Image: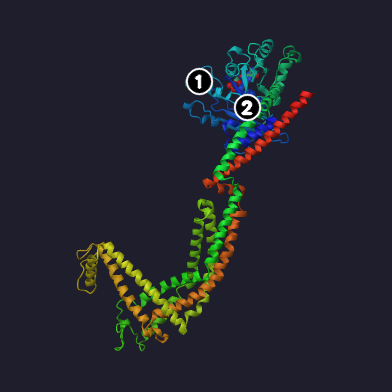
Amino acid sequence: MMMLTKKMIEIRSLLQTVGQSDTLTLPSIVVIGSQSSGKSSVLEAIVGHEFLPKGSNMVTRRPIELTLVNTPNAHAEYGEFPALGLGKITDFSQIQRTLTDLNLAVPAKDCVSDDPIQLRIHSPNVPDLSLIDLPGYIQVTGRDQPMELKEKITELCEKYIQPPNVILAISAADVDLANSTALRASRKVDPRGERTIGVITKMDLVDPERGASLLSDKKYALRLGYVGVVCRVPPTVGTSKLFNRGNGNISNAIAKNENAYFSAHPVEFGPESHVDVGTKNLRKKLMYVLEQTMAASLKTTSEAISRELSETTYEFKVKYNDRPLSAESYLAESLDSFKHSFKGFTEHFGRAEVRELLKHELDQQVLNLLAQRYWNRPFEDLSQSLPETDPLSELPKANMENPIWQIKLDSSQASLTKLGVGRLATSVVASALQAHVDHLTSNSRFAAHPFARKAITEASTTILRDLSYDISDELEICIKPYKYRIELEDNEWAKGRENVTNVLKDELRVCEAAAKNLETQIGGRKKLRDVMGFIDRVRSGKVVLEGDGVGGAGGFSSALLRKGREAVFLRDRVDVLKMRLLAVKSKQCANKQNKYYCPEVFLDAVADKLTTTADLFLEAELLSKFYYAFPRELDSRLGRSLSQTDVERFAREDPKIRRHLDVVRRKELLEHVLKEMEALRQLEAREKRYTSRS
Ligand code: GDP
């Protein structure tokens, strides 16, 4: 049979991946022995390589959980430290160095650590075994070793030699068995000697007769018996280059040396002698005993796994409502729902919305132009040549005879149409799209996933950037006709008049609110009026400022003066806006012939024409292309191109999802393991029936 151990070892490594709990440990062979008993030599003979830390002062400070995996069809022999992720190590001296480093990493004051080092060795030359190498018992504490070291090692060993583990007690032939620390320790936990295998090393150091008598010891009788070995690598081999590299297999050399010794003494060790000798036999015995122990623990292990499974199933039900989840499905669902919300957005963000955005932007540009070219002080010229009869006698009336008005309006139009509407409009819409995408992301499942957020932002910025480049140039060409003389229809004029009225009203509200805000900041109307009065007096030349006024003036601090200047600006702006509102509403501005009186209406109508061209163009070139490309770009960035590990890492970024995934995974794994265990138990039962019948 000899496959139970292999299966069980596989099962154990599976269980380890889900953070196996203590209840699920499977039996191992625990190797104990005092220092220099030859413990390392035995383990190395089994593995066929020197790989354990050496050195007179070198104490194994951490347990080594050594898993041997027989790979019958492979040539390569390699080790791996699953917890370290160093990959496959084919050079055994490298393994030795790593183990040394790991041991030395335990601070000297802690002496030993019970945190095991996991080491897996794959080779066609090793049996399937699970061994645990423990720090060697020390007889006398050295000068530089703390007193409690001895105790700590004993404690650590005691923890590991509990059932169902098998104990491999190593004693040297040249030391009286009564003094064997290993046997004494085993006796404590296994008084009837039922799960201890005795190994007597250095058989070559005592005379054969005495050696043979050790192996049939009655005083420390062990049900699993003793095996005598000679594990020293013969010097001729040990020093030869081939084997020094740490890459040649030393099993054969040891076996040859050992055979030579035992067959030289056929009476003591021959077939008739009924004693068990040789590393080869030891291996066989270990495999057999472990297999038996595994078989015996099948039931309890199955039960433990079954309990673990029902706990996990319960957790899955109660916490997660039995909702299945995988990293892939989580990503796919998240992506779908994000694309769905994006689709929803595209249905509500079309030409009308683009138009509103652009018009608002151009309104601001128009306001700036007006402020620069018409509303600046002194604006006496705006109220030049007022007709005496006009009831709104305060209002401006440009003198048509004076070419200045024509030039002013033409240049304002030119400024508006030449300010780079193509680029401005494209970037306004592109930024709005980006902002919406960001908003959608923040409200999606991706909000908790930095990796995905970044991918989404990159997807949209890349597309928008690529599209914008050409679009702004093309749009600029589209609006070219408006850079020349523009003829307006009556209805366009009327619309402009209506719209600009609203723009001015809005601006008026903004200014009034800002003025109010300043008043509160300054601390009351009176104080504000005082400082504004002072600034007005300075401006009209009634008061002369001393110096530059930086440190304050007229009893006002410089901060206050700054606020006062702002307030004066706002007051003037409010005055102008009120006046211009009246102008726009006046009868003169109802007629497009009077466009020189009414630059506000004219420029608004021009802005409206620009907007109409731009929104049509941007809808076709930017929106629809972006709406088409973005979901596809998402698919490629968050779908196909991701590896299994990426998807897994993505899903695990969200702690809630990570816990959910862990439970699902644990449950699946335990179910799988339990099924395997059941199959093994059936196989085992069949085998038993078969052997009992024959
Ligand atoms: P550990 O401290 O228990 O791991 O013991 P080692 O395996 O390092 O062995 C201690 C010393 O005993 C080393 O010098 C080995 O070469 C030597 N040794 C180990 N096994 C044998 C053996 O079977 N025969 C002889 N003659 N020497 C051995």
- Mark number displayed over residue 74: none
Can you tell me which quadrant of the image ligand 1 is in? top right
Percent coordinates x, y for residue 421 in the rendering: 47, 73
The quadrant in which residue 626 appears is bottom right
In the image, taking residue 400 as reference, residue 317 lies left or right, namely right
The quadrant in which residue 670 appears is top right
Residue underneath mark 2: 28
Residue at the farthest right position:
694
Quadrant where the N terminus is found in the figure:
top right
In the image, taking residue 153 as reference, residue 588 lies left or right, namely left
Residue underneath mark 1: 151
Mark 1: amino acid: Glu
In the displayed structure, 276 sits above or below 473; it is: above
Percent coordinates x, y for residue 64 in the rendering: 58, 29
- Residue 662 visible at all: no
In the image, taking residue 547 as reference, residue 385 lies left or right, namely right
Mark 2: amino acid: Ser
Foreground residue among 171 and 15:
15
What residue is drawn where x is 53% and y is 63%? 345
Judged from the image, the secondary structure of the residue bearing numbered disc 2 is loop
Quadrant where the C terminus is found in the figure:
top right
Judged from the image, the secondary structure of the residue bearing numbered disc 1 is helix
Percent coordinates x, y for residue 298 in the rendering: 66, 29
Percent coordinates x, y for residue 133 in the rendering: 59, 26
In the displayed structure, 602 sits above or below 267; it is: below
Whole-angstrom CA distance, mark 1 to mark 2, is 23 Å
